[in-house]
Amino acid sequence: MAQEKRRAMPTREQLRIWRNYIETADALRTRLEGRLQSESSLSSADYRVLLELSEADRRTLRSSELAALIGWQRSRLSHHLGRMEKRGLVHRAPCPDDVHGIDVRLTDLGAETFRHGSVPHLRDVHELFVDALTPEQFAQVDEFTEALRRHLDLEP
Amino acid sequence: MAQEKRRAMPTREQLRIWRNYIETADALRTRLEGRLQSESSLSSADYRVLLELSEADRRTLRSSELAALIGWQRSRLSHHLGRMEKRGLVHRAPCPDDVHGIDVRLTDLGAETFRHGSVPHLRDVHELFVDALTPEQFAQVDEFTEALRRHLDLEP
DNA sequence: CCGATTGGATTGACATGTCAATCCTGTATC
DNA sequence: GATACAGGATTGACATGTCAATCCAATCGG
């Protein structure tokens, strides 16, 4: 009983399933990113930023909030916003409320681009993911993902 | 009946499940990569290369075979091998059989490094993935992953 | 009033990946 | 024998991300 069961090794079969799982998720992500890129000239990083801003009040978020929502490091966001600003998708301005803060606002072009991109993208998600699974399998995905998230202590 | 059902949009609930699925897989990958890095100073790309070479006959593969096995572009592999060779993990030499080919061989250091890295890594996989799931869930993962792979036309 | 500190964001150097262009060496064609 | 062309790998220019260092305006302590 002092015998701890921690740090066991996976069996060959478990390892196979693990590899399949992670490779498949990766392939799926890659496939969708490729389509998004060719349909809308947006990377998935661009899409993530545009999505959050679209849903935000007045299409505006403080830079740090945005970073937290997406789960990026500040510096990554800064670099990325620089590139997106150059393309005219977003605009940065000092935040009137918070002395140090910066307001990131979706431009009209950004909003338009997102709207045009999101429809085919969502259809792609349906086609490549939803269509692949039976309703039971779909429920199983939800369940098992939830189990993993709890195990990893991820936020809901 | 001329009414095609293709290109439907996901429901809000389906979208939530999709996002959870892909985010969780990503988080899991990231978590494991971090551990691998701190335990063995190996990136997951390094690990992938070392793994294939370890399992190969005479610890050697032709560059192009290796690329195909891992599913990388030639140029990526070339860059990566350059870096790994500098660290003494692999060695490249013209292939005697094939005039154009290059043999990539695992060095003793590479083999040793891989052996030392793989044990804790596999334990991490067990801890973060296998431990999170019941046997039934495990079987379900296998099943729906398989369904996804078929849908995406991925090789077994 | 001055120096230290803090919060928020940016910057720069560097690692990794992608795409297109190039290199190199045998082999085929005339 | 010279010329093109093939297969295989490398290279270079560029995009994206990471980590650590810095900037900059406010605020605090004395």
Image: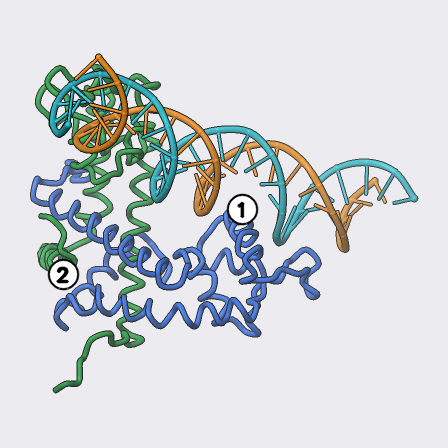
Chain colours: A green, B blue, C orange, D cyan
> In the drawing, does residue B84 fall left or right of residue B20?
right
Residue drawn at x 31%, y 55% is B34
Instruction: Return the residue nearer the eye: A92 or B75.
Output: A92
> In the drawing, does residue D19 fall left or right of residue A152?
right
Q: Quadrant of residue A89?
A: top left
Q: Position of residue B73 (x, y in %)?
A: 49, 48
Q: Quadrant of residue A13?
A: bottom left
Residue drawn at x 42%, y 61% is B47
Q: Which residue is mark 2?
A: A151
At numbered mark 1, what does the secondary structure look like: helix, strand or loop?
helix
Q: Position of residue B143 (x, y in %)?
A: 20, 64
Q: Is residue B87 visible?
A: yes
Q: Is residue A109 visible?
A: no
At numbered mark 2, what does the secondary structure look like: helix, strand or loop?
helix
Residue drawn at x 21%, y 34% is A67
Instruction: Return the residue nearer the eye: A134 or B44.
Output: B44
Q: Callout 2: 10 Å neighbours few (<14), some, many (20+)?
A: some
Residue drawn at x 33%, y 45% is A30
Q: Quadrant of residue D15?
A: top left
Q: What amino acid is labelled 1 in the image?
A: Ser
Front tag of 1 and 2:
2
Q: Which residue is mark 1?
A: B75
Q: Quadrant of the N terminus of chain A?
A: bottom left
Q: Is residue B130 above or below residue C25?
A: below
Q: Is residue B30 above or below residue C29?
A: below
Q: Position of residue B146 (x, y in %)?
A: 25, 61
Instruction: Return the residue nearer the eye: A70 or B88.
Output: B88
> In the drawing, does residue D20 fall left or right of residue A4?
right
CA distance separating discs 1 and 2: 38 Å
Instruction: Return the residue nearer the eye: C24 or C5.
Output: C5
